[in-house]
Amino acid sequence: MAESRYMTLNMGPQHPSTHGVLRIVLDLDGERVVAAKPVIGYLHRGIEKLAEGLTYHQILPLTDRLDYTACMNCNLGYTWAVERLLGIESEIPARAATIRIIMAELSRIGGHLIWLGSHAGDIGAVTVFIYAFREREWIYELFEDVCGQRMTVSYPRVGGVSQDLPAGWIDKCRAFCKEMPKRVDEYERLLTNNRIWQARTKNVGTLSEADVYEWGLSGPMARGSGVEYDVRRVLPYGGYENYDFLIPLGETGDTYDRYLVRMQEMRQSVRIVEQALDRLEDGPIMADIPRIAPPPKVDVGTKIEALIHHFHLVLEGFDTPKGEIYFPSEAPKGELGFYLVSDGGPKPYRMKIRVPSFSNLQSMVRMAPGRFLADMVTLVGTIDICLADVDK
Amino acid sequence: MSEQRITNEELKVKLADLLPGATVATDLAGMPVIAVANDAYVVSIKTLREEPSLQFAMLSDLTGVHYPDEPQPFEVVVHLTSMHLARQIRVKVRAAGDPPTVPSLAAFWTAANWHEREAFDMLGIVFAGHPDPRRIFLEEDADFHPLRKEFPTRGYED
């Protein structure tokens, strides 16, 4: 074996701070990191290949398994993409569109809470973990009330959403919106001016604006470095152009800035949910397109046409126009894009998922050199990766 | 984000002017799709990236698609984002030769490194000039590329 002055160390694939199975091969000069090479693929399930053998409705539960910390955003990104492929974006009923915005933003808060809890816990502020997961549970209870599932919700459908909001749900959601900003204040009291927190995060993992373009970063990873790239604003979709919200930006692009950006984003998401609740109108929750949208469950048991539609949709799916689309949406971790190629049939010819964590994780190669080994935990946390999202 | 607004038609005309030899079309949702020849690929990407009126400076995605019945069965599909225009476009190029080869974009964006490794891993497309041409998801001694159409979804063995 050749002599090297560096020690090679495997961090992972079983390491408590990697939140999944990530291996980082580190070259160490004492405590200093010289090079970091992430090794991924341990969670590769071949979702893109599986999708080629499934109808568009059947693919939906697979999208839950991308970023499982924010399943609703993955579900919605996918359904919006299929609707764009079908050209029915304008036919989604107003109530369904508004419910989707509410769910997407609640899910974003939930995703950020998991990031906050685990990131702070990794660095040593374990108390924050308990606080963050308390509010995350509140969000999951809201999801459970709507669709029976906490995490892998599979709630939206192509054409609308699967179920209407149950009685009393709006009040529960309003109570959450009223309380949540105070809870964010609580987290900030624990961390923002905390000297240990600042020492561990300031000037760690600094990325410049040029780095954002160089490494194809999106989400808080881009905005923390001052690049105003938020798909909701740059390429609006699903009605986001009608909502009033700010896009928090960082200045120095370090871990602390990304922390501040995500904290502000939670507050902005609460604002969006409140606006959506205000404009929620009565009406249908599914587009009236029998060849695509599943019929109401009650009709399936009582009306022969609905039963036939149900059978056709379940057994055969629906045909799509021949062609292709790319649909980017803003997931909590960044740009979640679906590239769908259709040959006209009921199954995608090719479905490429542009997952945010994949591109963002690559920037580890840029951030790690020169840092201490202990900072690696901070860097994994600040990227906010979900390995299921990275590996597909 | 820029305040500049440009219609899809204006953008198409502009792209056709700037990229002689390329075919500019639109997809189902109106996104401009530029098909370039293999030997014009790098030059076209350079123009899209550096032309001041376009500034497609962000590589959002790079992937491949397999069309087994066509003479050049492997297509590389690139999605670029311009914050200047608040637009995305798609660039397509066919891989030439055996093994199917396309020039690497890693010299323009480090981001291309992993995307190209994924396209190689999944489809067996070779990126000429890639700094680290290894598989990314599958084990290194795998002898198949699962997103090729002839690969059965259940795999070759249990």
Image (cartoon, coloured by chain):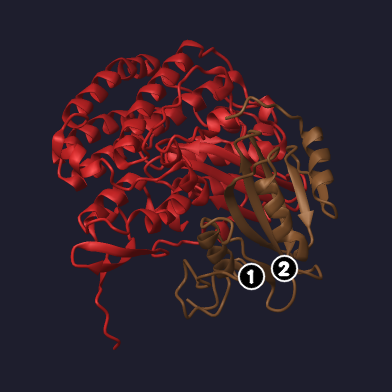
Chain colours: A red, B brown
**Image disc number at residue A274:** none
Subunit of mark 2?
B
Q: Could you confirm whether marks 2 and 1 are on the same chain?
A: yes
Instruction: Please report the residue visible at 20 percent of the width from the left and 37 percent of the height from the top.
Output: A198
Question: SS class of the residue under badge 1?
Answer: loop
Give the labeled residue for mark 2. B95
Which quadrant of the figure has residue A310?
top right
Q: Amino acid at mark 1?
A: Ile
Q: Is residue A225 left or right of residue A93?
A: left
**Mark 2, other Cα within 10 Å: few <14 / some 14–19 / many ≥20:** many
Q: Position of residue A292 (x, y in %)?
A: 67, 37
Q: Amino acid at mark 2?
A: Ala
Q: Is residue B134 left or right of residue A195?
A: right
Residue farthest to the bottom, as pictured: A1
Give the vertical position of A391 relative to B31 (above or below).
Answer: below
**Mark 1, other Cα within 10 Å: few <14 / some 14–19 / many ≥20:** many
Q: Position of residue A99 (x, y in %)?
A: 50, 23
Q: Nearer the viewer, residue B104 or A340?
A: B104
What is the spatial separation of the Cα atoms under label 2 and label 1, in whole angstroms? 7 Å
Give the vertical position of A342 relative to B8 (above or below).
Answer: below
- Mark before the other along the chain sequence, 2 or 1: 2
Labels 2 and 1 touching (C-beta < 8 A)? yes
Subunit of mark 1?
B
Instruction: Please report the residue visible at 15 percent of the width from the left and 45 percent of the height from the top.
Output: A124
Question: SS class of the residue under badge 2?
Answer: loop
Q: Is residue A390 visible to the viewer in this orientation of the structure?
A: yes
* Quadrant where the image shows the N terminus of chain A: bottom left
Give the labeled residue for mark 1. B125
Q: Is residue A346 visible to the viewer in this orientation of the structure?
A: no
Q: Position of residue A354 (x, y in %)?
A: 54, 50
Which quadrant of the figure has residue A9?
bottom left
